[in-house]
Amino acid sequence: MKKNVCRKIIGGLSLTSAMFVFQACYGTPQDFGLDLLVEGQVKAKASGLPIQGIKVSVAGNVQYEITDENGKFSFYTEMLEDLTLKFQDVDSTQNGLFHDKDTLLTERSDKIYLDITLDEK
Amino acid sequence: MIATLKKHAFKAYKKSAIRKHELNYLFWECTTKCNLNCLHCGSDCAKDSAFEDMPIEDFLKAVDTIQNIPKNFTVVFTGGEPLIRNDIEICGRELRKRGFKWSLVTNGHLYNKQRHISLLNAGIGALTISFDGLQESHNWLRNNTHSFTTVLKAIELATSSNRINFDVVTCVNQKNFAELEQIKQLLISKNVKAWRLFTIIPIGRAVNNPDLHITDAQFLALMEFIKINRKTKEIDMKFSCEGYVGRYELDVRDSNFFCRAGINIGSVLIDGSISACPNIDRAFSQGNIYTHNFYEIWHNKFQAFRNREWTKIGQCKSCKDYDDCQGNGFHNWHGEHTNVLVCHNEKIENAIKHQKR
């Protein structure tokens, strides 16, 4: 701990704080971004059964994932002030017909678990 | 006065980092298969279809031996072309479960929208794409007539995400040297924020192709180009950490030269060898994950990386800059290890002398 502090002081003195943010010649930059893991399960409101084939996407972002046979989804996405998740039935009558739903995430954590229910059409 | 102080402080920092020997950055050469046949293959990465891809479980077993993992420990997938593997995302998610960050170096050919999304979903945090010139010169080096268009699309995708810390790398050579300003403008127009330039080290197929290497005068001009452009801040331009550049240190990159291979940078190579950057002579391998505990090797070996006194031979022996340079980038020691392959500082000084004549 003490050694770490010394190292940082010396680094600061040499006015090259970037030395702590190195990258290998042929490597990538380091990742100092923030993201969160969004996981959950989508079920039918009436039956309580998991729904496969629901598109779970981040509003204003290209990212999405399709729920698996257990209605589950899991992905990392950028940590934002306002994060809205969209749940859309995109496979027509396959796996049933459900109304879309938007959910605004207000909790700020690096991991969020959501239980989502969708109304049948 | 300030410069001298800074220099001494940096030396002290460097000593302490070497002593600490903290593993911050781990390359995984997850495949040596590649979808391109670049003219400089074997210089910064190699293509060899003789090796089977290493199973994820084998790599993770090695990673799981690491103790006292620093907060920003990163795994960098490299190759060959890592996107040839369709299980990168599975490995990425496993790394994130363990609390690690991960990133990828790619030629961009397989980086399409679907892959962009699946990599983001799996928690990628940083990305580097190779882009080596305008249409003709890029396609020439990449030995592929569609490469320029394909890679530009990949760059557009990468810059569309705020999540990814993204940069472009360019191998400066005879064919693209006169285009650097145009390449810069093109990258800026594609919203690229960071651009790293490097030269091609004469190893692999790069040894016998004079078009791949720039002259001393061109190298000096490259330093000036980077120096001037870093002042304008249009794009975060830097010279890679491939070598010590004497009077241009701090003008062309954020920090003084410090080759961290084997000091903070380790690797697991395709055959399980434990080393530092993948372009380093494989004779320097320190062990193998199939026969050794990875972290014990990292912790107890790597002496040739941590103490570089052995590089004080050949032209380095009497060099006045040796303390700052310490034998240049470690990947400049191939073959008999009797002399450094490239001395970047010598190139600069030779060019300046020549100018004065």
Image (tube, rainbow, N blue to C red):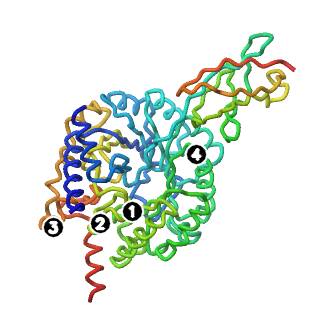
- Under circle 1, the secondary element is strand
Q: On the rendered image, what quadrant is the N terminus of chain B found in?
A: bottom left
Chain letter of disc 1? B
Q: Is residue B207 above or below residue A7?
A: below
Check disc 2 and report the residue beneath it.
B245
Check disc 3 and report the residue beneath it.
B319
Discs 4/1, front: 4
In the picture, measured across the screen, residue A103 lies left or right of residue B85, that is right
Discs 4/3, front: 4
Q: Residue at x 43, y 33 (%)?
A: B100
Marks 4/2 same chain? yes
Q: Is residue A12 above or below residue A104?
A: below
- First in sequence: mark 4 or mark 2? 4
Q: Which is more toward the observer, B197 or A22?
A: A22
- Under circle 2, the secondary element is loop
Check disc 1 and report the residue beneath it.
B239
- Pick out the residue farthest to the top: A47
Res. B213 mark: none
